Image (tube, grey):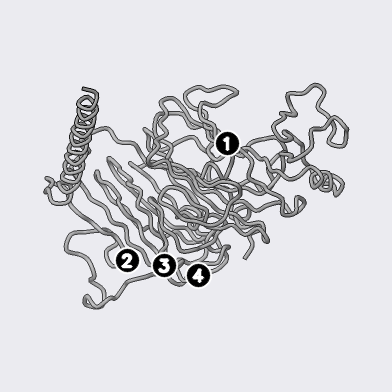
Amino acid sequence: MSVFKSHSKVNNRFSFFKYFTALAVCFFILTLSAYSQELYTMPENVHTRWTSFENPEGERGAGGKANKGAKGHAYDQVLAGETVTLLDMEGAGIIHRIWMTINERDPEMLRSLRIDMYWDGTEKPAVSAPLGDFFGVGLGQRVPFESTLFSDPEGRSFNCFIPMPFKKSARITITNESQRDLIMLFYDINLVMKEQHDNEVLYFHAFWNRDLQTTLGEDFEILPTVEGSGRFLGTNIGVITNPVYEDTWWGEGEVKMYLDGDGDYPTLVGTGTEDYIGTAWGQGTFAHACQGSLIADREKGLFAFYRYHIPDPVWFYEDIRVTMQQIGGAQTNKVIELIDNDALLQPVTAGRVNLLDMDPVPDIRSPDYPGGWTNFYREDDWSSVAYFYLNRPTSDLPLLPPVELRVKKLIE
């Protein structure tokens, strides 16, 4: 009898496994079928358009007219101080892809070229950022990489795959705020035009920020408070470490996301800077779909990294603010050495002891100090681009800072 029961259990488990497997296969087939439907199902009144210097207006039957159709206007120049329009379309549509390349890709030029995007006739751009930083790599650098939102196959081009819907119009410009003429700009913008959007859509925004030296104990603002509803897509960040801290670890700070009326404390909080981008115990170089670290040069003190919230959406309904703590760490004897060399810092934890919860807070040289590894507030050079969708085509965020601040202290 016991043997019969045992066989019965095995058969039941095997039947359940077969049933579960069949459901999984069906789900996979249905998912694949739905995805395939999008590729071959013909929509109504949706028209594909590309804009480039070969057809800047994206007009029907008007592409490649220069030089009798034999590649006559593949690129153009952007003189110092000049603004060039890349897209100016009336009507409803969605931008699906932006590609471009330029002949000068040094950090100063990449920070001096400004890309602006305007939706539905607004005077203030929804996107205003240095060209290089906008396309996924901070610090005015180019390296080969691929992510879900951006790519650069060989370190010489700029690709963006973020869907950007608009209801009435779309305009994209490039402004050269350097002292040099840009001789070659190639680009194309791929979009579809349609009669109207079936559902209410959100508008794409991007905000660039930089603090040449963060303030001790204050978080760096990746995204200042934005009112409205929408989705935070993520950020790419550049850090130039302050040499007064030598080569000690800078990335103990936690990301904080204040949602829908949060006060002193956020709803969403991370556990460390490298943790936020999916790695651990320090930060090397890698490029994954939604998280990566493209530059990790400890000798020069240069770090550039990203996190895109595609599989883990961050929604907000009233407002949002995103910050990153400015905290580093080192062994206690090294921290004492930094203090002796006049480095401005404040210990916050020692091992697992929360120093700021102690009263009084022990001096780092006192016998009562816990010792071991010490995390401390520090001041570094941080910059970032925040990407998000919002339920309106413009925001109250500050305008892009002047070019002098953007290019200052960049390292070749």
- Residue 2 vs residue 375, the one in the foreground: 2
Q: Nearer the viewer, residue 131 or 137?
A: 137
In what element is the residue under mark 3?
strand
Look at mark 4 in the image and give the residue it sits on.
Answer: 104
Q: Which residue is mark 1?
A: 271
Q: Earlier in the sequence, mark 3 or mark 2?
A: 2
Q: Earlier in the sequence, mark 2 or mark 1?
A: 2
The residue type indicated by label 1 comes to: Thr
Residue 105 in the image: above or below residue 342? below
- Dividing the picture into quadrants, the one containing residue 367 is top right
Q: Position of residue 140 (x, y in %)?
A: 55, 59
Real-space Cα separation, disc 2 to disc 4, in angstroms: 19 Å
Q: Is residue 104 above or below residue 369?
A: below
Q: Which residue is mark 2?
A: 53
Indicate the amino acid at tag 2. Answer: Phe
Amino acid type of disc 4?
Answer: Glu
